[in-house]
Amino acid sequence: MTSRARPSAVLVAVALLATGSEVRADPAPTLDGSVSFEFRGDAIIRSDDPSLEIIEAAPTIDAELDLRLADPLSIRASLIAESVFRSGPFQDRLVGDIGDIGAKAETLFVEYATGALTLYAGKINPPFGVGWDLTPGLYGTDFAEDYELTERIGFGGSVSLGGEGIGVHVLGASAFFLDTSVLSQSLIEDKGGVERSDGGPSNTGDPASFALTLDGGKLPGLPGLSYHAAISRQEGGRGAVADEAGYAFALHGEFPLGDGARLAPIVEIVRQVNDEAGPDDVTYVTAGVALLGGPWSLALSGTMRATDATGGPDTDDSLLQVSVGYAFGNGLSFELGYKATEVDSVDSDVVGALIAYEIEF
């Protein structure tokens, strides 16, 4: 715990010197956040490999917490409880007892945020790419989650630049390593924490890996359009072939169509060199669009995943999905979807549904 507290103190001190601001004690700490309860079911209704034709249904609980200690200091956390049981060939994964649930802190960090400057340190999800978050649809993020950076120990920050006439641009940077502490383990049912011997990208025990990002929006003549550009380098852990390098670029936005309807498109390209600190290079191309009108949403999206393999055949995987959702306006929402995938030359068709209830406080 001490090693994570020191970067926090250094970052806050630098922020105070840079901004000339003072930390103002509030009368009492305040807690803001949200809790989301989800239940999702998926059925692989057809596959070239019959052993994959299974049904999966399980709950997930997500909590986003922001404990504001003194303006502008806060402690932020993302907590998740989900099923850790994994299905196998011809084996359905259905709702089990409480013993099937694992709960853990995905993030837990100190944040200093004031004006154009944000600094943070602790257990973080370093920014890289946006397709894993913004691609619309029930299955839109499935492939993009491959390159999402999660559960790292590190520090970073961002500064907002620009202004009227040139748009808003946010430059960010972070340094990190994979979490192998007790925080990588889950409570109730432990699916096993991460160890240094597991190897993999950024599993080094020191913040030798980094990510740099540039995000922008409110561009002259294109007020609804935003962009994201990022590079990352993750030093390989034990047994790694090479360090992983990542490159991402995305355009996304939301545009009014009239009568309250909106169109939200996204396009993203991500290149992973020495993916997972191994010998192969992987390229992701994602495109999607959501039509939003009142409580209804209709989403169409797809991702191509091309692997340039070393010492083996190249592969081209694909995902195409369509889904429709309805938000009831009281925190309750429902989504129904279909996806067609080709993974390792195996075609599969999947249908699924998600019901969610979110409480904000």
Image (cartoon, grey):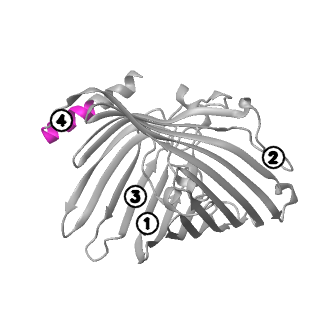
Pointer 2 or 1: first along the chain:
2
Q: Give the residue number, with chain letter if any, for mark 3.
A: 230
Q: Distance between the residues labelled 1 and 4?
A: 33 Å
Asked if disc 1 and disc 4 are in contact, CB closer than 8 Å, the reply is no
Q: Label 2 vs label 1: CA separation?
A: 35 Å
Mark 1 = which residue? 250
Identified at 87% across, 50% down, the residue is 90
Q: Is mark 3 on a helix, strand or loop?
A: strand
Secondary-structure class at tag 2: loop
**Magenta region, main secondary structure:** helix
Callout 3, which amino acid? Ala
Dot 4, how many residues are within 10 Å of its Cα: few (below 14), some (14-19), or many (20+)?
Answer: some
* Residue 340 in picture, x, y percent from top left: 71, 68
Q: Camera-side residue: 259 or 38?
A: 259
The reply to whether the C-beta atoms of the residues labelled 1 and 3 are less than 8 Å apart is no
Magenta segment boundaries in residue numbering: 10-20
Q: As shown in the figure, which amino acid type bears the numbered disc 4? A: Leu
Marked residue nearer the N-terminal end (3 or 2): 2
Q: Quickly name the residue at label 4.
A: 16
Which label number is shown at residue 88? 2
